[in-house]
Structures are given as C-alpha cells and as structure tokens.
Amino acid sequence: MKLVNMRRTGKAFCFWRTLKVAALLLLLIFVVIPIRNTVLYFALPRLWMGLSSPFLIKIMTHNQYFPVEEIPLGKSPAPIEVDLMELQQERFQLKAYPTFHTKAKALKEKADRGDAVARKDLEELMRFKPQMSDEDRAVFLYTLKVFSQACKAANLTWFLISGSALGAVRHHGMIPWDDDVDIVMNGSEWITIRNTLGNVKGFDLFTPSYNQWKFYMHDLPEGNRPFKWPNLDIFFFAEDDTYIWATTWGAKGSLANKKADVFPLTTKKFEIFDLPVARFCKSVVTAEYGDYHSGCKTAEYVHKTNEKYGVSSLVSIDCKKLHEVYPFVFYATASDGAIVEQLQINGKTV
C-alpha cells in the first residue's frame, strides 16, 4: 500500500513539475517578444510582431459588436443630394489600364506563334490582370465619391487602410489587380454612421453586427451574397489614449498602431480624389506589408466572385515586372530639395 502511494506521489510530483515548466515557457513566450514571434511566426500578422503581448490580447478580445437589430435606423443627421446621372460624367468613365491590355495582346500573339518565353510571361502577367471592367471601375469611383460626400456632411472620421492604403502610396489609387476599397471608421460612431449611410438615396448599407459593413449602389445586379458588388468594405476601430486598433476581425492585422502614427489624418491621391489616410501612411503600410515597392502579390480574395485563394495559389513577383503596364509611384528630388512623388507607367509620367 505504501508503495502504491509513493508511486502516486511520484506521478503527482512529475505532473506538477511539468505543469510549472510549461507555465514558465508560456510566460517566456508571452513576455519575451523575440521568443513569442519565433514560436508564433506563421500565426502572427506582420503588423503584430512589434506589439506587446498585453496589447495583442486587447486586440484579440476587443471585437466588433453592434446591436443593429435592437436599434432601428434613424434619420440622417446630414442628408445629401445624390444625382445618379453623375455616374455618366467623363471623370468617372475612365479606361481601365489600357497599357496592360496592349501588353497582354502582344504577348498572346507571340505565344500563339509558338514563343515559349512569351507564353510563360503571359501566364505570369495574367495572374495580375485587372479584376474590374471599365463599368465596374466607374461604379466604384462614383460610390466612393458619394460615400466621401456623406461622411463629410456628417463630420464622420474615416480613412483608407490595408490594400487601399497600399494602393494610395504605391499607385495613387487602387491596386490595379484588386477589386475593393478598404475603409475604417470609428466604432463609437456606428449609430451615426448607419443613420448617415443608410439613408443615402440610391444606395444600400449592409450592416451585420460582427463583421464589416458594405456600402453599394442599390440597382446593381443580384449576387450570391446578401450584398452587391462593387462595394466599399467598412471596418471599425477603437482607441485609447495611446493606441488605435481594429475591432472588426477582417482588419485586425491591418490596424494596430500608435495614435500618433495615425492622427491627425492627412490626404493622399487616390484615383481622381484626395482621400484621408494615416498621418505616417508609408510607415503604417510598411509595418503591415514590408518592402511593398519590390514585392507585388496577387489578391487573396476576389470580391466580385466571393472566392478566397489558398496560400499555395498566391503569386509574388518583383514589382519591376509590372512597371511597364501599371502606374507606380516613384520619388524624385526637386531643385529645392523636396521629395516629389511622380506617377509613372513604363518610365513615363502620367
């Protein structure tokens, strides 16, 4: 009987010792950021690597929830006039990347004649083809114009994040092979946001409690989702005295920054508009994407068809291969020493 008790005591000792060692290891992982980042390298977004573990826990546990079913839609605090005929204006009717289509056509002609190199180049180029038609692009631009007008009228805070912020600093517009616009707004203003955008004539607002909202034209074709495309993705943020972070899960890896890096907001050229972005937009984008000037990646999600691609399906190439067909921002030094941004396609300013 004593032998049995000793064995049980020995097993209990081993169990508690193992538990203490495991707890110590977890504490090291939690406290020592380099160890944490090494262990969780494939699980943590790039942006989170430099953040403290307590802040990461705050980000992961503070999630968007709006009781939209309990609070009815109210009147707009600042109604705006919308003329849908504006969509036909010349500034919205732009040709979408004609240089891409010219290059693709030339490569196809060579490939059809048996040129193996041209065929390979064409296959690579088509992975970065524009996802939007000229008509889609016009709807996007007009929707963005109406959204911006409504937010300005209601004095709502918003700015570009994620791929749209990247597009602003690298292309002065959308990433050419992307098909949505990513916007973040203050979650504490959600009722005012809904009352404002939910009352815009000719437009609809999709407002789930837990996920990003969608703003889009009412008369678009029906799809396989409860919202329509093209649409604007609206995410939400929270803030304290020092930090700002996304509460919507789809943007948590894109916004977790010091407030001083984000506010006061500035503006950046985005297509035919000047739109709000983070104060130090290039630094914020670098924190999320790394060296975004050298590496160009295909989209993980196609919003038009609601298709998500696995990691193995994504393609990354040197951005220089796309300089010939798409607009990229380059930097030059003016005579007074100021840094000037120039938008170029194949070495020519556009």
Image: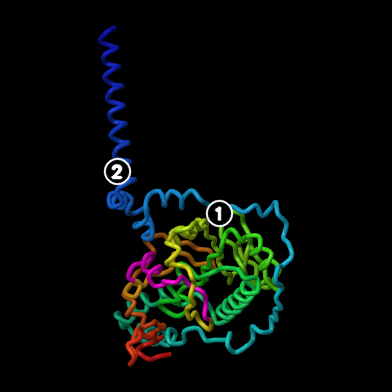
Task: Please provide percent x and percent y for residue 152.
Answer: 62, 74
Q: Quadrant of the C terminus?
A: bottom left
- Crowd band around label 2 with a 10 angstrom C-alpha radius: few (<14), some (14–19), many (20+): some
Task: Please provide percent x and percent y for residue 215.
Answer: 62, 68
> Which residue lies at the image location 51% right of the left edge and 51% below the top edge?
62
- Where on the picture, by quarter, is residue 298? bottom left
- Residue 112 in sight: no
Answer left or right for 329 relative to 141.
Answer: left
Task: Please provide percent x and percent y for residue 202.
Answer: 70, 73
> Which residue lies at the image location 28% right of the left edge and 23% below the top edge?
13
* Above/below status of 50 relative to 232: above
Can you tell which mark lies on residue 135?
none
Q: Label 1, on which residue?
A: 64
Are the residues flagged by discs 2 and 1 in contact, CB closer than 8 Å? no
What kind of residue is marked 2?
Leu
Read off the magenta span: 274-291
- Crowd band around label 1 with a 10 angstrom C-alpha radius: few (<14), some (14–19), many (20+): some
Q: Residue furthest top?
A: 1
Q: Label 2, on which residue?
A: 28
The residue closer to the viewer here, 188 or 163, is 188
> Which residue lies at the image location 73% right of the left edge and 62% below the top edge?
74
* Above/below status of 342 relative to 47: below
Q: Quadrant of the N terminus?
A: top left
